Image: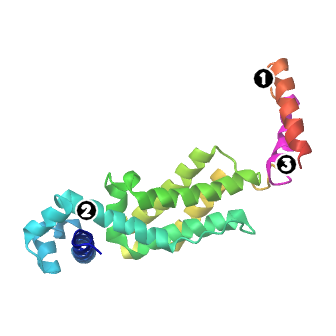
Amino acid sequence: MTSRARGTDDATTVESVAATGREQTRQRVIEAAIDLLTRGGRDAVTTRAVADAAGLQPPAIYRLFGDKDGLLDAVAEHGFAAFLATKHVDPDPPDPIEDLRAGWDVAVEFGLANPALYTLMYTEPVGTSSAAFKAGMEILMGRIRRLAAGGWLRVDEELAAQIIHATARGAVLTWLSLREERRNPALLTTLRESMVAAVTNQQPAVRDAGPAGAARALRAALPEQTTLSSAEQDLLREWLNRLAADG
């Protein structure tokens, strides 16, 4: 090995060690901020307090996160990643509606177990830009697509996602806003079942899951609709016949 090659390898090793050390320090600061947030709320998370708790000087916070808002964004992202880790994904659940209920319960339970962190996650604008938040929403959309494929979905997929997400977030934030003696578990159950009733059918609209079953169901209902012209109905019927034949 030439001296130049050895020098390059040594420089790469030094950079790797430095990056690892920086990430470890960054994680220590995030954990210190979460501890302060949990014990004292958002106002307790000052750059000086976090630096002291992490054993650093305040300027280190600015080098790592830019400013306090950057630190809070990192804390929220950490929260979304922790939430994502609690989610169970079954690509073929035996009962997609029970799977929906279970996913909703997991979201609410995480919020109730981490009230200060959850409040930060869902009351700051960082939420929708979080990579972990987006991954979590993909899991939710997978559940919704399975409901749709089985003929269980009552509303549009995007609206279903909004209802599910909004009811879970509303349930947690409402519960946390109540005094201890006013917290009735029936509130959470009722909100969950209201969500299920709003986004799913009591019986599947499609008897057989999959494109062929959906095509047969739509073909059967086609004569009752008046939105399409006769020519458009004929074309759609031809497409549906092809899809139905594949089943």
Q: Does the magenta stretch include residue 144?
A: no
Dot 3 falls on a residue whose secondary structure is: helix
Q: Quadrant of the N terminus?
A: bottom left
The quarter holding residue 75 reads bottom left
Residue annotated with mark 2: 72
- Judged left or right of residue 136, residue 180 is left
Dot 2 falls on a residue whose secondary structure is: helix
User: How many C-alpha atoms fall within 10 Å of the one at disc 1: few (<14), some, or many (≥20)?
Assistant: few
Which badge, 3 or 1, comes first in the chain's sequence? 3
Q: Position of residue 155 (x, y in %)?
A: 65, 45
The residue segment tinted magenta is 207-224
Which of the labelled discs sits on residue 228, or is there none? 1
Q: Which residue is drawn at 22% across and 74% down?
A: 14
State the residue lying farthest toward the front.
2
> In the rendered structure, which amino acid carries the disc numbered 3?
Gly
- Judged left or right of residue 242, residue 97 is left
